[in-house]
Every structure is written in C-alpha cells, then in structure tokens.
Amino acid sequence: MFEFFIFAFVTAITPGPNNSMLMASGIKFGRKASIPHFLGIWLGFTFLFFVGGFLLSYVPAQIFDYLQYVGYAIITYIAYRIATTSLDTNKESSSVDKPFTFVQACLFQWINPFNITNNQGALIYFLVLPFCVGIWLILGEQLQNSLEKNKTVARATYVVLGVSMIASLLLA
C-alpha cells in the first residue's frame, strides 16, 4: 500500500489537467474564488474512485474508447482556452468569466476516468489530493501579482499550463 501512496502522490503533484487548470484559476481569480474548483477536484476525483471505477467496469471497451476521445477533445479545448487567456487585469472583460464551479470540477474528473475499484486507493487519493492540488492553487495565487506586472511572463505561464495539459494526453 505504501507503493500506491507514492504513486498517488506523484500523480497528484505533477502537472496535468487538474493542476494546470487550478493554477490558472489561482492566477486569474485568486484562492478564495477558486475554492469551489479545488473542492470539486478533490471530492470529484475521490468519488470517481469510489463509485466510478465500479460503474466503468461495466462499460464496453468500444464505448470507453469513444468517451476517451471526447475527453481528449474537451481537455484540448480547455488547454487552448488557458493558453489564450486574456492578460487584461480587468476581470470583467476577461475571456474566462469565472473559475470552475464545484459541479463543473467534479464533472471534469469523469472525462479522464481511472478504472481503479480499490477503496483503499480512493482513501489514499482523498488524503493526498488536498495537499498536492492545494500547492498548485496557492502557487497560482502567489504568482498573481507578479504576472499582472509582467505580461510576457504571464503569457508564457498560461501557454506552459495549456501545453502541460496537452502533454498529459500523450501519457494517457
């Protein structure tokens, strides 16, 4: 079980769609406004392990393959939106109106489902995710002021976050 804890920690702390989106949200909207997104990732991912792994084991492989491509398309679209995020500091005129809601973040977990039906694994992720995902949110918020002052670095940051989401698809 210790090996799975290490696996869960590494997968939860490395750049990927959830962490990139949450960091971008922290940069754009701050920590307080991004808390529902954070909670949606944490609880949605855990729920996916508890229930989703069992339900998804009954989905025929062909349907699962098509769902995977839909997930790739959604992640690619969101990566594009992050990479092209407006650098306008006026939050009302931004192309991204508001951070993900709790429900949106929960539902986002289902586009890249894991087929793990181990309750102990779900508990480990439940314990590991708040720390790992929270680091990305806090880091995003910490970058907020400096990125508002340097538009070139801000653009590069958003592009790197979008590219990291696309790169995670290559590993899937």
Image (cartoon, rainbow, N blue to C red):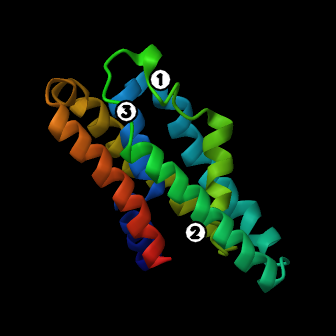
Query: Spatial distance from mark 3 to mark 2, Cα to Cα?
Result: 28 Å
- Locate residue 94 relative to residue 140 in the image: left or right: right
State the residue at coordinates (28%, 54%): 160
Counting residues from the start of the chain, the first of labels 2 and 1 encountered is 1
Residue at the spot 44% in from the left edge and 18% down from the top edge = 93
Q: How crowded is mark 1: few (under 14 residues within 10 Å), some or many (20 or more)?
A: some
Number of the front mark, 2 or 1 = 1
Q: In this view, does 99 lie to the left or right of 138?
A: right
**In the image, what residue occupies the spot 45% across and 52% down?**
79
Q: State yes or no: discs 3 and 2 in contact (Cβ < 8 Å).
A: no
Report the side of 53 relative to 8 (left or right).
right
Callout 2 secondary element: helix
- Mark closer to the chain start, 3 or 2: 3
- Coordinates of residue 166 in the picture (x, y in percent): 43, 64
Q: Name the residue under label 3.
A: 26
- Residue 112, percent across and down? 61, 65
For the question of whether residue 134 can be seen, the reply is no
Instruction: Sort mark 2 into few (<14), some (14-19) or many (20+) by Cα contacts within 10 Å.
Output: some
What residue did someone put label 2 on?
121
Residue 119: image quadrant is: bottom right
Q: From the viewer's perspective, is residue 38 above or below residue 107?
A: above
Q: Is tag 3's residue or tag 1's residue first in the polypeptide sequence?
A: 3
Give the side of residue 27 with respect to residue 34, left or right: left
Disc 2 residue type (three-letter): Gly
